[in-house]
Amino acid sequence: MSMPRTALLLVAQLVLSTASAGAQDDVGSRPVGVAIAAGGGSAYDLVGFHVELSSPKGAVFFGSGLPVFLAGGSDPHYDLAAGIRFFSGMREGIFVSFQSLWSLRGDQPTDDRGQPSGDPQHFKSFGATVGNRWRWNHAFFEIGAGLMLIQGSVGCEGCGTFFPIPDLSLAGGYQF
């Protein structure tokens, strides 16, 4: 059997097995599910991970970005990403997600001169994202776009004013 024909048969088998798996979808129809995802975007604190607790049509998630792990003791940066999302399908399909970021102890906001100002624990942003999640049994991939309202401008994090910025999301994960 030639290589192109073998590859074509493997792709056809994958497509057919994915379609038949949807008919007996025990992962998507469970009453409660847990997933872990890694990616980029506001739901992942720029670049990081989150854990989801989900029903077939919605999920709440909490996570943090890689700066938590990379900063070490030199310049601590602790953010918490949290949100809720709703799916058009069973833990897949079109989704709408609402998320926020909070700075936790160690991430001091600054004023226009770069001087520490206010409480190091502060609200950073709020946003909404619309996207799509594709799921293959336990594994999934998602992409989305939206808008974030970031508190403060450059050099003035936590100043009380909000500025809109675009938010793109790209992630992959595993549904337990």
Image (spheres, rainbow, N blue to C red):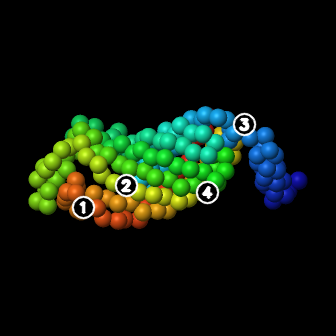
- What's the amino acid at mark 2? Phe
Q: Name the residue under label 3.
A: 26
Q: What element carries label 3?
A: helix
Label 4: which residue?
94
Q: Which of marks 1 and 4 is nearer the N terminus?
A: 4
**SS for dot 1:** loop
Q: Residue at x 24, y 61 (%)?
A: 161
Residue 2, by quadrant, is: bottom right
In 3D space, how far apart are the residues under numbered discs 2 and 4 (Cα atoms)? Answer: 20 Å
Contact between labelled residues 3 and 1, with CB atoms less than 8 Å apart: no
Q: Which of 55 and 109 is in front in this view?
A: 55
Residue under circle 1?
161
SS state under label 4: strand
Q: Report if the CB atoms under discs 4 and 3 are less than 8 Å apart.
A: no
Q: Residues within 10 Å of mark 4 (few under 14, many from 20)?
A: some
Name the amino acid type tagged 1: Thr
Helix, strand or loop at mark 2: strand
Closer to the camera: disc 3 or disc 2? 2
Above or below for 109 versus 68:
below
Location of residue 74 by image quarter: top left
* Residue density around tag 2, few if under 14, some if 14–19, many if 20 or more, within 10 Å: many
Q: Name the residue under label 2.
A: 126
